[in-house]
Amino acid sequence: MEPDAATLIDRARRLAAAGARRVLGIAGPPGAGKSTVSQLVVRELGPDLSRLVGMDGFHLAQRELERLGRADRKGAPDTFDALGYVALLRRLRESRDPVVYAPDFRRDLEEPIACAVPVPREVPLVVTEGNYLLLWDGVPELLDEAWYVAPDETLRVERLIARHIEFGKPPDVAREWVMRSDERNAALIAPTAARADLVVRL
């Protein structure tokens, strides 16, 4: 039986009520609907119980990607500061500071923005989402629970192309980018579904 929205929210509420800071990770390939699921959970639990911290805030800046010669495959695992993300998750889990500021990623700018998401110490649940949560070393052990979002593949690709068009790419460029770059990353991510506690099929 596939979990419905009510089941997901109930699981998240149980994590938030566990008595100490918990971290829920939501993984999956590009265009899977990770943000949709994450935002649903955070919206239903409210700001007193949960905050959303995205992995995408650790994108390397465009200027740095160009310096490294990686701009043409932005979104691949080595175009992020993975160690910085792990360090932030560890700090969030420890919950020693009055507030931890996490970065955010602005799709309209295609750039990360530092210190954009405040996470007060009293918030019991951090929801974090991104492609590589179950791939990168150091991340899985910092998650109290991990969900993998696995939608219909045809719909996922169509949604991904539409997203690239929405944020400025011409349709032919958007499709080429998805089939070349995003789908390569999706193939890399797919085997990590076996590491999740729950698979969510949208």
Image (cartoon, helix red, strand yellow):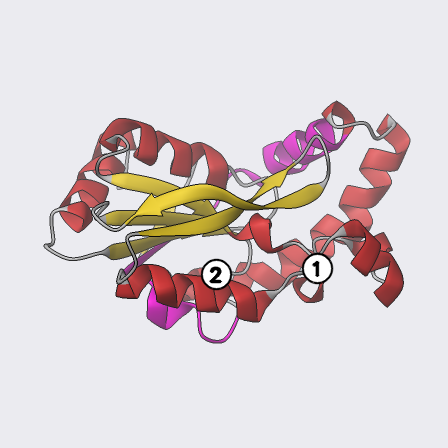
Q: Quadrant of the C terminus?
A: top left
Q: Nearer the viewer, residue 12 or 83?
A: 83
Task: Find residue 126 and name its label.
Answer: none
Q: What are the residue bounds of the magenta stretch? A: 136-164
Q: Residue 102, percent across and down?
A: 47, 50
193 lies above or below 156: below
Secondary structure category for the residue under label 2: loop
- Residue 155 position by quadrant: top right
175 lies above or below 150: above
Q: Residue 55, percent across and down?
A: 53, 53
116 lies above or below 85: above
What residue lies at 40% left-to-right and 38% top-to-bottom? 38
Q: Residue furthest front?
A: 98
Q: Residue 24, percent across and down?
A: 32, 52
Q: Which residue type carries mark 2?
A: Leu
Task: Find residue 133 and name its label.
Answer: 2
Viewer can see residue 26: yes
120 vs 178, left or right, is left
| Residue for badge 1 | 76
Secondary structure category for the residue under label 1: loop
What residue lies at 87% left-to-right and 63% top-to-bottom? 67
Q: Residue 128, percent across and down?
A: 41, 50
60 vs 147, left or right, is right
